[in-house]
Amino acid sequence: MLRVVFLVPLLPLAGFVTLLLSGRRLGNPLAGWLATLTVAASFVVTVVVFTGLFQLPATGRSYTQTWFTWISAGHLHVDMGLLVDPLSMTMAAFVTGVGALIHLYSIGYMEHDEDFPKFFLYMNLFVAAMLLLVLADNFLLLFLGWEGVGVCSYFLIGFWFERNSAASAAKKAMIFNRIGDSAFLVALFLIYERTGSLEYHTVFARLGAVGEPSLVAIGLLLFAGAVGKSAQIPLYPWLADAMEGPTPVSALIHAATMVTAGVYLMCRINPILYRAPDAAHVIAIVGAATALVGATIACAQNDIKKILAYSTISQLGYMFLAAGIGAYDAAIFLMLTHAFYKALLFLGAGSVIHAMNDDQDVKTMGGLARLMPITAVTFLIGWLSIGGVPVFSGFWSKGDVLLNGYAFSPALWVVGALTGVLTAYYLGRAYLLVFRGQQRWVEARVTGGTAGHGPRDPSWVMSLPLVVLGALSALGGLINLPIHPDLDFLDRWLTPVFESRLLQHHWGIGGVWTFALIDGGLAVLGVCLAIALWGHTSERPAAEPVFLRRAWYIDWAYDRFIARPSTEVAVETSSVVEAKGIDGAVNGVAWLVRATGRQLRKVQTGYVRNYGLGLAAGLVLILAYVLTRTS
Amino acid sequence: MTVEASWYLTLAAVLFTIGAIGLLIRRNVLVMFMCVELMLNAANLTFVTFARRLNDIAGQTAVFFVLVVAAAEVVVGLGIIVSIYRRRPGASADDIHGLKG
């Protein structure tokens, strides 16, 4: 059963190729259905492989499928191979599952777009690249998928490239990712130089012979790559700008593919981090800082998608916090539940944006709950889940992270708990502004001035994913209940992969319950705060300080201290170095040749006698030479 | 009495010089052509002289080749000259300088 794993990345890839060759002919909506079907089929195959893996004994749950030798040069030998283990299958399952739901939703969301087939072509390639990333059995193949999702995000963020803002957002994503990727590449060189291999098992087996400084360097460089891909401080601004893409793309980037890759990488290299605790601590600190900064910014945004974007940054910070302190299963658990509720929130936001005729400002919405009941209820579930209100999935996963955080350092717990309160608060603000309170939109603008209908729930194609994701968000916590050792399925499932964890702390049942009560209380506090502040009004400037609305001026700082100086250097280079130096040299050579030619032209008089004289003179010279030499 | 080889060689040199100078200073294309013939035959004379002097047939063979080539050259050269005169009667060599750079 494990042998069919090759179908998992190949099915979306086949969908991509089919759409590439005949996407226009399939048209709308057939191209979308085909794309959805390939990802859904990939999910089914993943489940089959998953079951197969589950039936193996816990210690033997690792299977490598080698397709062919990819690179063989000297000592460097890289295979095209897939690794099936609990971690990769967990990732593959939610990438394909959530991915398929987002594909389904897109059929409805993109139905009026001219480039409908092209959209699904990119989406399929995106999922295929992400699956290659998580299933790779060596670092280089992972890097291939890593770059694949990078380039797909570029295509999709800039999908409406006629808009200037979308085009530059796509470039921004590309450049920020490139910064991280260059560090990743250096890490690959270092890994190969130190261990002589790029294949996970071989590398991890040889780590004992590698010095700690090298391991710290490898860990930090890989983390730098993850910082770019997963939008952590300081490389996070691209994710907020990535909202220029169509909303399903945001859902795909934030929930299933792309940004989770960094967390996955950190979990995958747990043997390296285990031997390099300094690097791991850096990861935890950066993660905690990102979680708090992201959450504070999200409190003051007015664009519904921006709120969700900063929320993702914050949640990813949580995941890195967990990965950094060695609680990998908590990181994966949070990633999983986050995939459910973040996809749900984005798709809900997409429905709202559709209903509001492409308006994204929460201040001009309001009162949509009675018009769009399905969207409102599912969005509410998303809010309560991400806020960590008890019983909903986020409560369990975030509680897991906080529990481990406290065991590591109470300071991390304080930051995490504060972020938790803010999370419940800012999404409450978004929910209340969009769905409750006064109606602040104008009927005519929303219906586009034509005799259309007002805001209402979308068609079943878009509602079904909302309902499914809503159910998953509400009940997703069941896969890893910490209250009893027999109920933390995910933890036990992942244990073989995370053997070398930094943290070896087990709370008694009383400790777990205490933390659960505190977490639940904090979440309810955030919810109450949101209701108290935003339940009855949509204007409260005191709660939206300018420096938060401007996102801590980070974008401004990037512009002022990096973008503008480099532009000036570029301008200087183009006007001085390029014009005078490089152009000067090239033009100088041309001028020299032309001047020489102009002088030499005069020799060609056209008179036969002159040529004759030349011949005679040459003859005399040759004769003179011959005669003087022989004599 | 036999004539010394040096006389033949001197004559050849004189003929060659006359031909070369004529080629350089005359403007009439036909005369210049004749000068070329003069130089060719000066060379022939040298060949024959050395053939006799060294008792080697190779020099005389070379003369045959030169004569054949000269005949062919005359055919082509005269053809060109005739066609030039047909287009512009009385043209001198200096009037034909279409290849001036």
Image (cartoon, rainbow, N blue to C red):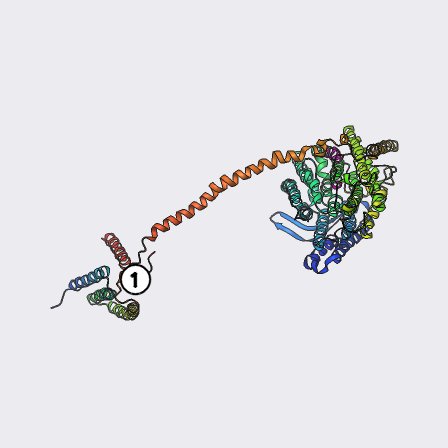
Q: Is residue A514 left or right of residue A616?
A: right
**Residue A516 appears in which quarter of the rendering?**
top right
Q: Nearer the viewer, residue A296 or A129?
A: A296
Element on which disc 1 rests:
loop
Q: Position of residue A405 (x, y in %)?
A: 78, 32
Q: Which residue is mark 1?
A: B96
**Residue A314 appears in which quarter of the rendering?**
top right
User: Is residue B24 highlighted in magenta?
Assistant: no
Q: Position of residue A402 (x, y in %)?
A: 80, 33
Q: Is residue A523 visible?
A: yes
Q: Given the current orientation, which residue lies at the most extreme left position?
A: B1
A553 vs A617: above or below: above
Q: Name the chief secondary structure element in magenta.
A: helix
Q: Chain of mark 1?
A: B
Q: Nearer the viewer, residue A507 or A313?
A: A313
Q: Is residue A599 left or right of residue A4?
A: left
**Amino acid of disc 1:** Ile
Q: Position of residue B100 (x, y in %)?
A: 33, 57
A451 vs B75: above or below: above
Q: Position of residue A394 (x, y in %)?
A: 82, 39
Q: Is residue A85 visible?
A: no
Quarter holding the N terminus of chain B? bottom left
Q: Which residues are magenta?
A: A289-305
Q: Nearer the viewer, residue B42 or A608?
A: A608
